[in-house]
Amino acid sequence: MLLLNKGDLMMGSSMVVGGFFGDEGKGKIVAHLALKDKPSIIARGGVGPNAGHTVEEGKQKHGVRMVPSGFIYEKARLLVGAGVLIDPRVLKYEINEFKVHDRIGIDKRCTLIEEKHILEDKQNKWLSGDIGTTGTGCGPANKDRVMRCARQVKEIEELSAYITDVPLEINDALDDGQNVIIEGTQGFGISLFYGTYPYVTSKDITASQIASDVGIGPTRVDDVIIVFKVFPTRVGEGPFPTEVSSEEAKRMGIAEYGTVTGRPRRIGMWDGHMAKYSAMINGATQIALTGLDKLDTSCYGMTEYDDLSSKIKEFVSKVEQDVGIPITILSTGPNISQTIDLRS
Ligand code: GTP
Ligand code: IMP
Ligand code: MG
């Protein structure tokens, strides 16, 4: 007989998703969770190489676009789900750069980004001008997948050494009681369905879609950790209700630049309404809050909750009240070590 009670199943999957417009610091949070929770698998969902995660460990600063940010934990198997678009050049570069040849697997059904997709993304005025895409070919490649004329990874020889069945690997690991981290990319506000359409990316990127990207059903996700940054940012065009001017952002010391494009990020103030709505659609169970050092520089690098200033503690309470779920991880700087983990 099949087990029907969730409590009877040995499962351990945590998913990390973006709660604002992307670039909330998911890369850092995933890397922290990977080192702390020691998962056997870290699997990446999301759109494709339009994402740029930053991982800082010690004096090293890494930017990853295709390889899961949890690569920093050397014992984990690294998987890229079927929903993720693959640019073979970017992927191969990162496999070499991060020396993950022997532990990375790419789902055989992933869609390939080809040169023509990148050209179209850059040359199409609607995409590059009005929407302000990253120019990485993601939209045109997803369009071809919908038109059923895109090529899949299994059709090319150059990635054959890495090809696998990602859903089988993850579901088997979960059946076996192992820990798995599922990594989302982008953020709620640029979801194709729930974001500020048409100023969005080319796919939904909320938790249900990320689960589908890596091939697990919604009932197999134990925790959804939604990442918010104290000062949300947005890259590209589109509405941003709490935006401040770039002069104001510089004056406040909170200016930021994009990992993939190097473009200045638009900066805004905390948006409790968006955070609540986004947590609802993501089914979030926990919050990771990044950029606390930007709210009060005195807390930069702190690792103990009790040491935080009352200004920060009051803000943390406000965020929990706004969203209605607990904050379990606080980030006090870009480095993995600059983290307060309140999980038991
Ligand atoms: P996407 O998948 O592209 O949405 O990116 P992401 O969510 O992984 O975030 P990304 O790394 O692009 O941007 C976050 C930026 O904030 C990076 O430069 C991080 O190094 C930095 N960062 C993360 N946490 C903190 C923090 O607590 N304080 C400060 N000052 N910077 C942080
Ligand atoms: P595209 O995903 O390249 O088509 O870009 C569409 C919109 O999504 C643009 O506004 C991009 O700046 C934004 N975008 C796509 N990926 C990311 C990301 O990882 N972080 C932040 N913004 C993103
Ligand atoms: Mg980013």
Image (cartoon, grey):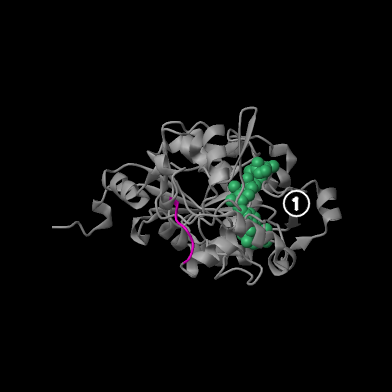
Left or right: 67 in relation to 262: left
| Above or below: residue 320 compared with residue 340 | below
Left or right: 258 in relation to 6: right
Left or right: 212 in relation to 20: left
* Residue nearest the viewer, comparing 78 with 118: 118
Q: Which residue is mark 1?
A: 263
Question: Among all residues in the image, which is located at the extreme left?
Answer: 1
Label 1's element? loop
| Above or below: residue 339 compared with residue 219 | above
Q: Quadrant of ligand 1?
A: top right
Evaluate whether residue 21 shows in this view. no
| Above or below: residue 109 compared with residue 240 | above
Q: Amino acid at mark 1?
A: Arg
Q: Which residues are magenta?
A: 149-153
* Residue nearest the viewer, comparing 317 with 172: 172
Find residue 127 and report its horizontal and vertical position in percent: 68, 66
Evaluate whether residue 195 shows in this view. yes
The quadrant of the rendering that contains the N terminus is bottom left
Is disc 1's CB within 8 Å of ligand 2? yes
Residue 341 among magenta residues: no
Magenta stretch, overall SS: loop
Find residue 67 and report its horizontal and vertical position in percent: 52, 42
Q: Residue at x 35, y 60 (%)?
A: 217
- Image quarter for residue 266? bottom right
Find residue 148 and report its horizontal and vertical position in percent: 46, 68
Find residue 263 and report its horizontal and vertical position in percent: 75, 51
| Above or below: residue 344 compared with residue 227 | above
- Image quarter for residue 177? top left
- How many numbered callouts? 1
Question: Among all residues in the image, which is located at the extreme top?
Answer: 59
